């Protein structure tokens, strides 16, 4: 068998980061909270979820999206798009780019989302059944679609290059960044705003997730409910948010003298072809994605100092994923799951967590996995808990696994 | 004292579409207020809910003026 064909390594420059999460609004606020979990906002129970076995989620608080975006723009977007546009504006400003003067046809947008405007569908289905077809909002069809965030961001920024959505369940944000890496590599654009956005305070979805026994039912202590790698973990907590990067062809970033926070150096994806829900029990699918990403970057496992894991806080994911990480990377990388603070933001997770990996490389600091009080002895990797750990990090990995067996991995370098 | 139909529509436009209240005059076409076909259908539902009228058979286009919209709503309100 011949070796797989590979392009020469290509490191896309990350010049901007934008984050809107339940841990904080803005990259700096999110980063600060992650590294000091005691300061995390409280987790309110949600009226929309009343009576369900899980009646809470990690929601974005302290953000008046209508005031930030203005009434006219706000009404033409679903909430997941509101969060995406706010994160995109932050990322673009952070990159020092001015949409008024950039070559707009060379700017692309790639945003992942698993569910788009699902809560709007919930609401309008109730309108349909209770009040009839004439009471259904005309905005549902154009705004609640999964590509809503990509089109809203492109419109808001005036980005007129390729614009697309990626939907691969919980790996959508990671696949979006991988797709952006490939677009830059081929020269399809010079700049990409890429990542993920999600907001699914949906009674319908969470009822289903409860029936699936995928979400934590620790309703007496929501803040402690998401506890990746802990012996007493009992499922994920749904979160909402957006995480976007500004990525550029390296020569483009260099030519304008941009400050480079990190690089996206390699990408790999794979399918388990195994189950609609469960990951391959041996982690072979995510292993293929990770090995592909390492080869794509031309980086050895020994050089990976940190992994921002998928780490959902489900019994099976955390074990399968960490056994795979130990097998591929060894025992030295510092592993964390930031979902304990942000919740599982589904299609946004890969965008948020890749942005946090960029910040970890930049600050040479690995944030702790919150709520890890009783580490599961079967988890065979070095999980950072309690306090952030300083480290000399040259390269890091982000892994994501999605329902349906959609796996993705990114390799990032300084 | 209850608000006039024109005032009600003006309030809906300002609150839901961010329309400048100064720009809302009887002779102004709706398209000049940036109300496209999507916005008009949204506005139709808002007016129906707010004023308890049925505008189902009212033809609305963005070429209509604010005054024509107000007249149409008033006709339905007294029908």
Image: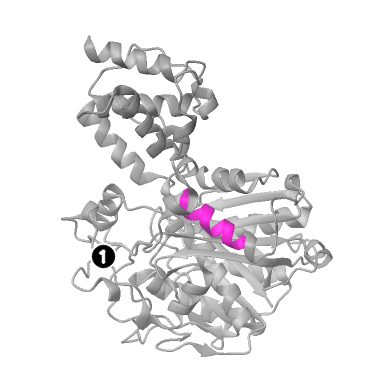
- By secondary structure, the bulk of the magenta-drawn segment is best described as helix
**Quarter assignment of residue A184:** bottom right
Please provide the residue range marked out in magenta: A81-91
Quadrant that contains the N terminus of chain B = top left
Question: Which quarter of the figure is the C terminus of chain B placed in?
Answer: top left
Relative image position of residue A83 (x, y in whole percent)? 47, 55
Secondary structure beneath label 1? loop
Determine crowd level at label 1: few under 14, some 14-19, many 20+ residues with C-alpha closer than 10 A.
some
Q: Which residue is mark 1?
A: A44
Q: Is residue A127 left or right of residue A178?
A: left
- The relative height of residue A62 versus residue A365 in the rendered view (above or below) is above
Rendering colour mode:
one colour
The chain ID associated with circle 1 is A
Q: Position of residue A350 (x, y in %)?
A: 52, 63
The relative height of residue B73 versus residue A103 in the rendered view (above or below) is above
A343 falls in the magenta region: no
Residue for point 52% across, 30% down: B34
- In the rendered image, residue A222, in percent from the top left (x then y), is placed at 26, 71
The residue depicted at 50 percent of the width and 59 percent of the height is A171
Residue sitting nearer the eye, A75 or A381? A75
| In magenta segment, residue A89 | yes
On the image, the x and y values in percent for residue A102 come to 75, 52
Quadrant in the picture for residue A232:
bottom left
Looking at the image, residue B31 sits to the left or right of residue A226; the answer is right
């Amino acid at each position: 068998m011949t070796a797989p064909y590979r392009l020469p390594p290509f490191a896309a420059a990350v010049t901007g980061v934008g984050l809107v999460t339940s841990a904080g609004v803005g990259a700096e606020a999110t980063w600060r909270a992650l590294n000091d979990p005691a300061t995390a906002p409280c987790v309110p129970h949600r009226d929309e979820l009343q009576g369900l076995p899980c009646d809470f989620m990690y929601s974005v608080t302290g953000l008046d999206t209508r005031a930030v975006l203005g009434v006219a723009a706000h009404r033409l977007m679903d909430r997941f798009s509101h969060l995406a546009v706010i994160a995109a504006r932050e990322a673009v400003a952070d990159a020092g780019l001015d949409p008024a003067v950039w070559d707009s046809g060379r700017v692309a947008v790639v945003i992942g989302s698993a569910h788009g405007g699902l809560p709007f569908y919930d609401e309008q289905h109730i309108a349909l059944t209770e009040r009839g077809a004439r009471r259904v909002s005309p905005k549902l069809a154009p705004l609640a679609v999964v590509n809503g965030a990509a089109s809203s961001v492109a419109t808001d920024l005036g980005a007129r290059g390729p614009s697309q959505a990626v939907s691969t369940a919980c790996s959508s944000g990671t696949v979006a960044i991988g797709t952006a890496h490939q677009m830059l590599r081929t020269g399809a654009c010079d700049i990409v705003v890429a990542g993920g956005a999600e907001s699914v305070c949906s009674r319908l979805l969470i009822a289903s997730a409860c029936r699936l026994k995928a979400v934590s039912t620790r309703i007496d202590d929501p803040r402690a409910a998401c506890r990746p790698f802990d012996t007493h973990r009992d499922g994920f907590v749904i979160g909402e948010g957006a995480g976007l990067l500004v990525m550029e062809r390296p020569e483009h970033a260099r030519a304008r003298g941009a400050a480079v926070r990190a690089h996206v150096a390699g990408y790999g994806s794979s399918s388990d072809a195994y189950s609609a829900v469960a990951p391959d029990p041996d982690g072979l699918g995510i292993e293929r994605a990770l090995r592909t990403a390492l080869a794509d970057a031309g980086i050895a496992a020994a050089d990976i100092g940190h992994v921002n894991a998928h780490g959902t806080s489900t019994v099976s994911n955390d074990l399968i994923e960490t056994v795979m990480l130990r097998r591929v990377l060894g025992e030295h990388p510092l592993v964390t799951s930031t979902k304990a603070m942000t919740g599982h933001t589904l299609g946004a997770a890969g965008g948020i967590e890749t942005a946090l990996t960029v910040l970890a490389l930049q600050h040479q600091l690995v944030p702790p996995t919150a709520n890890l009080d009783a580490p599961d002895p079967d988890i065979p990797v070095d999980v950072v808990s309690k306090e952030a750990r300083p480290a000399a990090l040259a390269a890091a990995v982000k892994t994501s696994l999605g329902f349906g067996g959609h796996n993705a991995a990114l390799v990032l370098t300084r | 004292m209850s608000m006039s139909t024109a005032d009600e529509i003006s309030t809906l436009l300002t609150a839901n579409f961010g329309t400048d209240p100064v720009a809302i005059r009887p002779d102004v076409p709706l398209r000049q207020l940036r109300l496209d076909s999507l916005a008009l259908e949204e506005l139709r539902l808002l007016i129906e809910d707010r004023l308890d009228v049925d505008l189902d058979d009212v033809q609305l286009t963005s070429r209509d003026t604010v005054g024509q919209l107000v007249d149409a709503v008033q006709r339905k309100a007294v029908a």
